[in-house]
Amino acid sequence: MRLNKRSRVIGVVALLLALGLSAGWSFSRPTSQYRSEPVARGDIEATVSAIGTLRPRTQVEVGARVSGQIDRLHVKAGDVVEKGQLLAEIDPRIPQATVDAGRAQLADLQAQLGEQRAQLELAEQQQARQQQMFKEGSTRLEDLQTAQAARKMAAARIDQLKAKLEQTRSTLGADRTQLDYTRIYAPMAGTVISLTAEEGQTLNATYQTPAILRIADLSAMTVWTDVSEADVSRVKPGMPVFFGTLGGDGRRWSGTVRQVLPAPQEPKSEEGGSAPSTGATGKVVVYTVLFDVDNADNALMPQMTAQVAFVTAAVKDVLAVPLAALQPVSGQRGHYRARVLDGDGVAQAREVRLGVRNRILGEVLDGLGEGESLVLGELNDDDKPRRFQW
């Protein structure tokens, strides 16, 4: 009986000791657990993102300046041409006939001029004879005046013919130019990027110059970038910029901002400037920013879409922290609140001052040291390791 009582006392004491140890362990551990990462160094780029379109830096639309049927096209899309190379020929028969008629008219006027010069020479001789006879009293004053008038008329007729000759030469020169326009030559070296006409097609150049083809120098491209009005004030000429394309396999091209156009572009054709877009809630105003990029390997093609990033600020090898772990301090630009774990795993509040920031990281100027454990968030029940259960 006494032994059973002693056993019960020992059991109660053992239970109390177990409960005490469990309670002590529970109160000694931190009440919360956190996800954290050490503050480390890295590179930060602050950028403005936009979408652009690639266009050749230099291109020209080649058109026909005379009406007529296209007899021959000597090139096709994709051909590389040299400056002065023959591209196309238009039926020259009508311009050639006009030139031939002008030459005939010019020859006729030259013949008339020769005849009129002979008439002037005769009129001058008759005037001299009448003057001599008038001095000798063997002719009338009326006959002398008639001879003088005839000489003046012959001289005026020569001036008239000279003016007609000059006019005909000018017209003939224009007709010859029109004839030359039936043979179309490349105004620049480059690649034929499009053909808008075919052999046998009749062109009407009466009111406008019909386009035949387009030549572009593809060794240098210009990116026409649409930047929203909210971001355009941060983009300046001379600013570094980089971009990738949808099919670029991660390749990155770099350049420098050449120009920020001062006004939004009006809607234009494919080769024209960018146009303002319209969203569901109204008109979205965008400004066009231009920059050039080398394309020596022809990896870039006209009308490709470029995913552009303008680098507004960049720093290297600085203390970088994720902005998601910080809370902005109201009314103090660049100041944030952070939590840092001390040696016992307890989160301590800290005020941090940041410099260059992008959408993910910020440059630490003050408030954190390299290697300190920055709290990213608290672990929830699903994040905590499960305890072994019997």
Image (cartoon, helix red, strand yellow):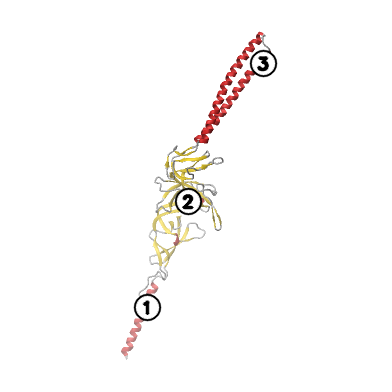
Instruction: Please name the amino acid that badge 3 sits on.
Output: Gln
Other-residue count near label 3 (Cα within 10 Å), few / some / many at <14 / 14–19 / ≥20 = some
Other-residue count near label 2 (Cα within 10 Å), few / some / many at <14 / 14–19 / ≥20 = many
Going by the picture, which residue comes out furthest to the bottom?
1
State the separation of the CA atoms marked 1 and 2. 69 Å
Badge 2 marks a residue whose secondary structure is strand
Q: Which residue is mark 1?
A: 20
Residue 145 disc label: 3
- For marks 2 and 3, give the one nearer the viewer: 3
Which of disc 2 and disc 1 is earlier in sequence?
A: 1
Instruction: Please name the amino acid that badge 1 sits on.
Output: Gly
Kindly indicate whether the residue at mark 3 contacts the one at mark 1 (C-beta within 8 angstroms): no
Which of disc 3 and disc 1 is earlier in sequence?
A: 1
Q: Which residue is mark 2?
A: 52
- Residue positioned 32% across, 86% down in the render: 7
Residue 145 locus on image (x, y percent): 67, 16
Of residue 316 and residue 198, the one placed in the foreground of this image is 198
Residue 356 locus on image (x, y percent): 45, 54
Q: Quadrant of the N terminus?
A: bottom left
Q: Is residue 100 visible?
A: yes
Which of disc 3 and disc 2 is earlier in sequence?
A: 2
Badge 1 marks a residue whose secondary structure is helix
